[in-house]
Structure formats: structure tokens, C-alpha cells
Image (spheres, rainbow, N blue to C red):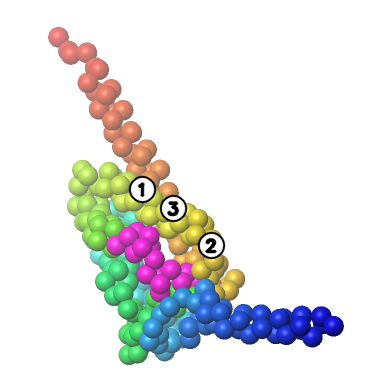
Amino acid sequence: SLYPLRRQEKQKKKKKKKMDPSLVSQGHPYVPLDLHLPDYSPCLLSMSNIISVFAFSSLLTVSLIWIFSGGLKKRKVDRVLMCWWAFTGLTHMILEGYFVFSPEFFKDKSGFYLAEVWKEYSKGDSRYAGRDAGVVTVEGITAVLEGPASLLAVYAIATGKSYSYILQFAISLGQLYGTAVYYITAILEGDNFSSNTFYYYAYYIGANFSWIVIPSIIAVRCWRKICAAFRLQGSQTKRPKAH
């Protein structure tokens, strides 16, 4: 009978499937399971602790800028923009800067906050733990160029510099471009980097949502301001000279 032979073949296939390294977890919570992260150290801080620290530090930054801008006799919209650029600039430089220059953050055993942030966020996008070249490039440009430029925007708004609008427009376009590359590369690579649906929508989608909506609004506003300035300049040059 061929039945015993077929049964043995099925058992062999099952054993091979179990031994397939691509299906064996490497001792981390990330997807894909075969992502190689030697000496991975699990998160020591809980998700609530990580988010609470980030929320508190962000609120503190925004509050200090709001109080400071109150003495500059600026319009509320300018004060809000100063708060945004301070928040996003420090986030780019400190949080994303740490990721760019700390390739082995997943090995940290001390519970260092910035390492814990990226260990946690990698549950929503494991390309961070795996040091995907596209992600590192986007984050590197963001941290090195857009971070300092955002803080310069705070100064430009506070002091009424002529380059304020063009600077804000350029940074916003850079943020939108970086976000587009971030999502497009994920889609082209299969869009399968989240541990589960919760992390997909909370981290991968939700955490980046602000850098789509707010830069879009600022870019449109700056575009209108710049166009209005050129229209005004054009109308002034066309006026006939008085005799």
C-alpha cells in the first residue's frame, strides 16, 4: 500500500517546515519572524510610560514656546506655528536623530528612553529595528536638515524675517516628501512590517498622521502668502509714475 509511504512523506515535510529558519522567531516581537536581531533586549518600559513621557515633554515644549511668544506681540496663528516648529524640530533632532546614529538600539539593556521608544515603535514598523536603508535615509535627512531648519523657522517667525514663509514652505514640502517615500517604499516592499493591526494603525498610521495634515496646511498657507506678496509687488511696479 502507498498510504504508509505518503504518511511518512507528509511527516518529513512537516519536520522540514518546522525547521525552516524563515518560520522560526528570533526572540523578538517583530514581523517578519525571521528578522535577524542578534542580542535583542526586550522593552523595559511599558507603552503607557513611553507615551506619557513623550506627551509630557511635548506639552512642556509647546507651553514654554507659547508663554515666550506671548511677549512678542505676535498673532495667535504665528504663536501656534512657533509651537509646532519647536515641537517638530526637537522631535526630528532628538528622537529621530538618535535612531539614525544608534544602529543597535535594539540591544540596549539599560532602559534608556530613546532606545525604548524605537523598540516600541518597531512593533508598528519593523524596518526601524532592521535598519532598512530607505527608512534610515529618510530619517537621516529629516534629523540633520529638517530638524535644525524647523528651529530656524521658530526664530524667523519670532523676529519677522523675510524668509519665514519660504522656509516654512520648504520644510513642509520636505516633510510631505519624506512621509510619501516612507509609505510608498513600505507598500512596494509588501506593507507587512507591523506585529498586529493595533500597532499598524496606532504607530504606523497614527504616529505619522500629524506630519501629513499639518505640513499640508502650512504649505498651502505659505503658498498663498508668497503669491500675495508677488502680486502686491507686481501691482506696485505697474503703477504709472506721477508727473
Question: Which of 73 and 194 lies nearest the eye of the viewer?
Answer: 194
Q: Earlier in the sequence, mark 1 or mark 3?
A: 1
**How far is the residue under mark 1 from the one under mark 2?**
24 Å
Number of labels in the image equals: 3
In-front residue for pair 137/174:
137
Q: Nearer the viewer, mark 1 or mark 2?
A: 2
Badge 3: few (under 14), some or many (20 or more) residues near its Cα, within 10 Å? few
Whole-angstrom CA distance, mark 3 to mark 2, is 14 Å
Image position, residue 124 (x, y; %): 50, 71
Q: Which residue is mark 2?
A: 191
Residue positioned most to the front: 1
Badge 3 or badge 2: first in the primary sequence: 3
Q: At which x and y percent is residue 61?
A: 31, 70
Residue, disc 1:
173
Residue 111 image position (x, y, % from top left)? 35, 88
Picture quarter containing residue 101?
bottom left
Stretch of the chain drawn in magenta:
124-140
Q: Is residue 216 visible?
A: yes
Q: Circle 3 sits in a helix, a strand or a loop, which is it?
A: helix
Judge whether residue 130 is colored magenta. yes
According to the picture, the residue beneath numbered tag 3 turns out to be 180
In the image, farthest residue toward the right: 1
Determine the image quadrant of residue 119: bottom left
The residue at 22%/13% (across/down) is 240
Question: Is residue 51 something that shows in the picture?
Answer: no
- CA–CA distance between discs 1 and 3? 10 Å
Label 3 sits on what residue type?
Ala
Q: Residue drawn at (45%, 56%), measured in percent from left and top?
A: 185
Left or right of 173 on screen, residue 237: left
Q: Furthest-left residue in view? A: 243
- Please state which amino acid type lies under the numbered disc 1: Leu
**Which quarter of the rendered picture does the C terminus lie within?**
top left
